[in-house]
Amino acid sequence: MEKKDNMTFIDKLRNARANAPGGNITLVSKFSDSYGKDSFLASLRKRAFAKNPIMPNTADIVNWVVYDTYKVAAGASVGASFNFYTQPIGTNSKTKMDTNLEQVQRLPDPQFMNVIALGLQFGPEVILADIIKIVNNYYVELWVGNKVYTEGRFEVFPSGTGITGSVAAATTVAATTINSNVLNNGRPGWDNLFDLRLPAGIGLGTQVNPATGERVQAISDGLTGVTILQGQQFKVVATAPGGAQTATAGGSGGAGISIVCQLYGILSRGVQ
């Protein structure tokens, strides 16, 4: 009758270790081939990375600009109000030259953004008469959720970007249209932006410390601007209290109106 082996795997491993030279045994050689660069498991890892999975509990933090463009043809009506960030890429023939917004009035999950500045830039083709028309008739609001977080006239929100220079206008023509390639909403420069961040050291009331459960004083850190949370809707609205305006006609030198709205800040997105 065959004797039954009642030794468990652990017992066999202990026995092998005790009988090995020096009282030790290694199992690395048993598995090393499975983890080599050309192994099956290595190929599985390569395939997994090729799928770009979202890594849980990990964020990719980058400087970012979310931009959108409003356009009106020469001689067309500029509405009594118009919105930015309501028509994502692919809508009404919008391309990446017009916007990098992917969804209507929101960032794709799981993204959120700390917006530190808002800028408005006229296209280089817009003539002075149309720039004056917009600047003198429209004010701007930044909406996040159902609240306005900042507002003001166009001059309050220079783009910090744009074409600059100088041109000489002909003086022999009675009615001269100035080439407005040099005209924009403020001077190009990162120091010429309306900063949405609260200065450091401002008391913001109290909040509960999740680690201790105690109430502590919340103090602004100087880095936080307007936060757009995951799934939260946002838009920038330009409104003319006096009603709709009309872009200068092409026969009068108009080339249409294009305005780019830019939200500068820090974007948090899933790691791929």
Image: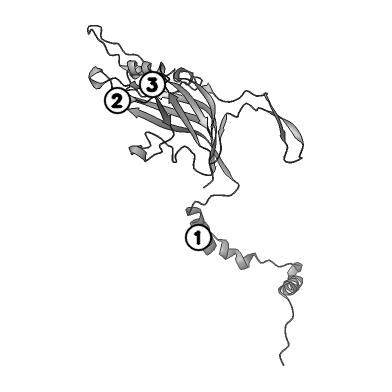
Question: What residue is shown at x 74% (from left), y 81% (from top)?
Answer: 6
Q: Going from the N terminus, do you reach mark 2 or mark 1 first? A: 1
Q: Quadrant of residue 212?
A: top right
Quarter of the figure that contains the N terminus:
bottom right
Q: Nearer the viewer, residue 65 or 166?
A: 65
Instruction: Give amino acid for label 2.
Output: Ala
Q: Are marks 3 and 1 in contact (CB under 8 Å)?
A: no
Question: What residue is shown at x 49% (from left), y 39% (from top)?
Answer: 107
Between label 3 and label 1, give the one nearer the viewer.
3
Between label 2 and label 1, give the one nearer the viewer.
2
Question: What residue is shown at x 27% (from left), y 14% (from top)?
Answer: 177
Q: Secondary structure at mark 1?
A: helix
Q: Secondary structure at mark 3?
A: loop
Instruction: Give amino acid for label 3.
Output: Gly
Q: Which residue is mark 2?
A: 76
Instruction: Give amino acid for label 1.
Output: Ser
Q: Going from the N terminus, do you reach mark 3 or mark 2 first? A: 2
Q: Is residue 146 above or below residue 161?
A: below
User: In 3D space, how far apart are the residues under numbered discs 3 and 1 (Cα atoms)?
Assistant: 64 Å
Question: What residue is shown at x 25% (from left), y 6% (from top)?
Answer: 171
User: In 3D space, how far apart are the residues under numbered discs 3 and 2 (Cα atoms)?
Assistant: 14 Å
**Left or right of 161, for residue 125:** left
Dot label at residue 200: none
User: In 3D space, how far apart are the residues under numbered discs 2 and 1 (Cα atoms)?
Assistant: 59 Å
Q: Which residue is mark 3?
A: 243
Q: Is residue 257 above or below residue 58?
A: above
Q: Secondary structure at mark 2?
A: loop
Q: Going from the N terminus, do you reach mark 3 or mark 1 first? A: 1
Q: Nearer the viewer, residue 256 or 138?
A: 138
Q: Which residue is mark 1?
A: 43
Between label 3 and label 2, give the one nearer the viewer.
3
Q: Quadrant of residue 12?
A: bottom right
